[in-house]
Amino acid sequence: MTQTIRAVKRTTSLGLNDAVHRSTPLSRAGLLERLFTLAFSGLVYPQIWEDPVVDMAALEIRPDDHIVAIASGSCNVLSYLTANPARISAVDLNGAHIALGRLKLAALRRIDDHAVFRRFFGEAQSPDNVALYDRLVAPDLDPVSRAYWESRSLAGRRRIAVFARNFYRYGLLGRFIGAGHFLARRLGCDPRALLEARTLAEQRVLFDRHLAPVFDKALVRWLVRQPASLYGLGIPPAQYKALAADDADGILPVLRNRLERLACGFDLKTNYFAWQAFGRGYGPGPDAAVPPYLEAQHFETVRARAGRVAYHQSAITAFLERQPAESCHGFVLLDAQDWMNDADLTALWTQITRSAAPGARVIFRTAADERLLPGRVPEAILSQWHYDEASSRALGARDRSSIYGAFHLYRLGGDGR
């Protein structure tokens, strides 16, 4: 088991090094890059932070579609099954994310009761989840994923034990949110107070009272000027620079505005991203907002279609190189392109264009409110794609996660400029 875990970690590390490292190791930029890859080498996202409802509206998934998506926490990948694609290829450099996705697939194969499945991945904090894993789910897992979940963390517990202790408080993002809560309380603010709101108007009042003041604190102002302070959000140094450039006054007002939108832009009763940020888990009760794959109305559908998802530990460009020409109908890149230099972007879009079926769609998000691709991807490639600016703006406004600068939709065919 130890050798298996080491092999997975080595694959993750090598892939991250290729994706992030741009500077010499002894430079300041190189040190920041290597600190990021170290932080990113384990589980990062217990929940993905892109809105699957927006994704599905943009992709317009059809029954014969092959969707290629970066896996992350797999909430979106499994939620896409509700739109009835033919198959989904879930790709991720991070071996922990692959193990999480395969755990969810094994659970869908073995658990036939929605309440039990919801307790496992929705509440994610019952000892019964671990007992269920040992009895029912583990025998159905592939050896690599099983080795991951049964190996010991630094605390000495098996990794699967996080599902008895609120899974959403773990991983790099979960711990980052926890640190944010701790710091806010020490500074006299209380993020959980926002969850007491019953209306959008009350959300605004509670944000102004309990969250906005933290951005006036000298310690917070200093912290957010340090790129490493945002590694817990999965933001590498290159993405930090793009984010900071989105406002003339630097990164602090950008972060404040996005937290404000998360807190005040959508009704709490429908926004599970806000519950994760301010409550460190999904809301209580069977009617609380959750990703589509966890909703009772979709449970049997997701179970029946779970076999259409396949996981691959790989860089997405390398994965697309292995796909036949014109074989992919939708591409979900998350914010991965914010990590890339011009050569990486060109290599990626060369493979996207080659493997894209007629009418294919590409969606992605950027930290900054920018187009990203023009001037960086050769015109001969980009001109084959049409950038739907109106739909991109409209769909971005609907994204409940609220943390990105922009949402982008490209369609194969037409002028991409």
Image: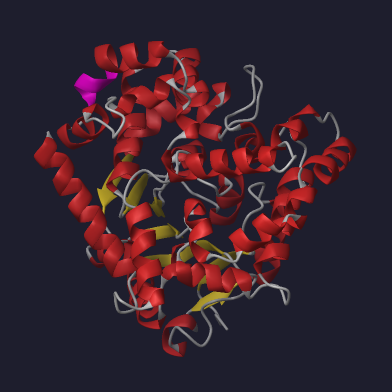
Q: Is residue 72 left or right of residue 54?
A: left
* Residue in the foreground of this view, choosing between 189 and 280: 189
Quadrant location of the N terminus?
top left
* Residue in the foreground of this view, choosing between 220 and 75: 220
* Residue in the foreground of this view, choosing between 174 and 358: 174
Q: Quadrant of residue 6?
A: top left
> Is 395 part of what is drawn in magenta?
no
- Tag count: 0
Determine whether 52 is above or below 120 in the image: below
The majority secondary structure of the magenta stretch comes to: helix
The residue that appears at 86% across and 33% down in the rendered structure is 199
Q: Is residue 341 left or right of residue 177?
A: left
The residue that appears at 67% across and 61% down in the rendered structure is 221
Q: Quadrant of residue 200?
A: top right
State the image coordinates of residue 291 (x, y, percent, origin top left): 56, 35
State the image coordinates of residue 153 (x, y, percent, origin top left): 28, 33
> Is 139 part of what is drawn in magenta?
yes
State the image coordinates of residue 40 (x, y, percent, origin top left): 37, 53
The residue that appears at 44% across and 13% down in the rendered structure is 113
Q: Quadrant of residue 5?
A: top left
The residue that appears at 33% across and 13% down in the rendered structure is 132
Quadrant location of the C terminus?
bottom right
Answer yes or no: is residue 112 visible: no
Determine whether 255 is above or below 302 in the image: below
Q: How is the image coloured?
A: secondary structure
* Residue in the foreground of this view, choosing between 311 and 403: 403
Determine whether 289 is above or below 204 in the image: above
State the image coordinates of residue 396 (x, y, percent, origin top left): 67, 58
Instruction: Write the start and end of the magenta stretch as one range.
Output: 137-141
